[in-house]
Amino acid sequence: MSVLVFLEHHDDQITKGSLAILTKAATLGDPDVAGVLVGSGVTAAASQAGKFGAVRVHVRDDDGVAAALPQPRVDVLAGLVREHGYETVLFAASVLAADVAAGLAARLDAGLNWDLVDLAVEDGELVGRRPALGDSVYVSVGWTGTPRLALFRSGSFDPSATAGGEPEVVPVDGELEDFSLAVTMVEQAHAESEGPSIEDADVVVAGGRGLGEPGNFRLVEELADALGGAVAATRAVVDAGWYPYSAQVGQTGKTVSPKLYVAAGISGAIQHKVGMQGANVIVAVNKDANAPIFEYSDLAVVADVHAVLPKLTQLVRERKGG
């Protein structure tokens, strides 16, 4: 069962999600798990992949594919699958990965299962697990042929460094399709933020409509800063323009799995639960004792967030001596 993992990278580092998929791939029984890196100046990052289970890393390293555009990456992956016969190609969820996975499925006339949260070998067959009906049930999904393509929900697995050594680095050459080079990236926006991203943070403090107005998000930001965590928001808050989309947690946002998730003024609709139910400990603060979020919180605080958050921030800072 030959496995190829698409390794997305930012700032010369392979993303946490890609490393997590590599970790999972190493458990599927393929002793020769491979990864693929596409970009400019990415060769050095290949050694990082070796620590997480990649025995071989195919690298397309040139300025022509520096921009994070999907079609050149589809060209590279399609060539690798055809040349080396990879039976399974795995992707960690992201905007770019979703585009690449869909393009590769069309190019190879292959089956793509998306939003998976697990993958296992059962009776010699690869079986995926995917939430359905608002995450109230899980269904098993499969493929009718190869190559099998799978796109995983963020936070499904944790990256875990193995005892692996330096991987074999295999340069990838070959011409790209003319239509793949027809698009030029004019500008790439970067969210202005400090501290860890919500997907990587061990602590996430999220705010909802219960904060009352955009200016009250400073209460969430101050607590997150005291805890060394990241700030998140609900869809309603993002849609209202209170906070940027990059901070949205939920079914149409990002999925997080921190050690601690603090929900401030969040009612806890099922769409939000989908994005944060993987947290180890969930603490909710809401003045509505009947808020749905209390049904799946480890600690429920029935109180006004405007009174609780400042006091909690003060206590944390005093404990830390700051």
Image (cartoon, rainbow, N blue to C red):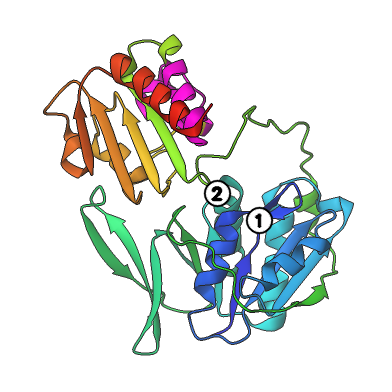
* Residue 74 to residue 191: above or below: below
Q: Is residue 293 visible?
A: no
Which residue shows up at 88% across the image and 51% down it? 63
Which residue shows up at 41% across the image and 77% down it? 144
At numbered mark 2, what does the secondary structure look like: helix, strand or loop? loop
Task: Residue 319 in the image: state x and y as whole percent.
Answer: 44, 32
Amino acid tagged 2: Ser
Say whether residue 246 is left or right of residue 315. right
Task: Residue 199 in the image: state x and y as whole percent.
Answer: 51, 45
Q: Is residue 229 magenta?
A: yes
At numbered mark 1, what does the secondary structure look like: helix, strand or loop? loop
| Image quadrant occupied by the C terminus | top right
Callout 2 environment at 10 Å: few (<14), some (14 to 19), or many (20+)?
some
Q: Is residue 70 visible?
A: yes
Say whether residue 250 is left or right of residue 82. left
Task: Residue 309 in the image: state x and y as whole percent.
Answer: 35, 21
Amino acid tagged 1: Glu
Tag on residue 94?
2
Which residue shows up at 82% across the image and 62% down it? 44
Which residue shows up at 38% across the image and 43% down it? 260
Magenta stretch bounds:
217-246
In space, the residues marked 2 and 1 are separated at their CA atoms by 9 Å
Query: Do tag 2 and tag 1 residues touch (Cβ < 8 Å)?
Result: yes
Say whether residue 251 is left or right of residue 62. left
Residue ID for mark 1:
8
* Residue 241 to residue 189: above or below: above
For residue 237, what is the image quadrant? top left
Does label 2 or label 1 sit earlier along the sequence?
Answer: 1
- Most extreme residue toward the left is 290
Q: Main secondary structure of the magenta part?
A: helix
Task: Residue 249 in the image: state x and y as whole percent.
Answer: 41, 37
Q: Is residue 239 magenta?
A: yes
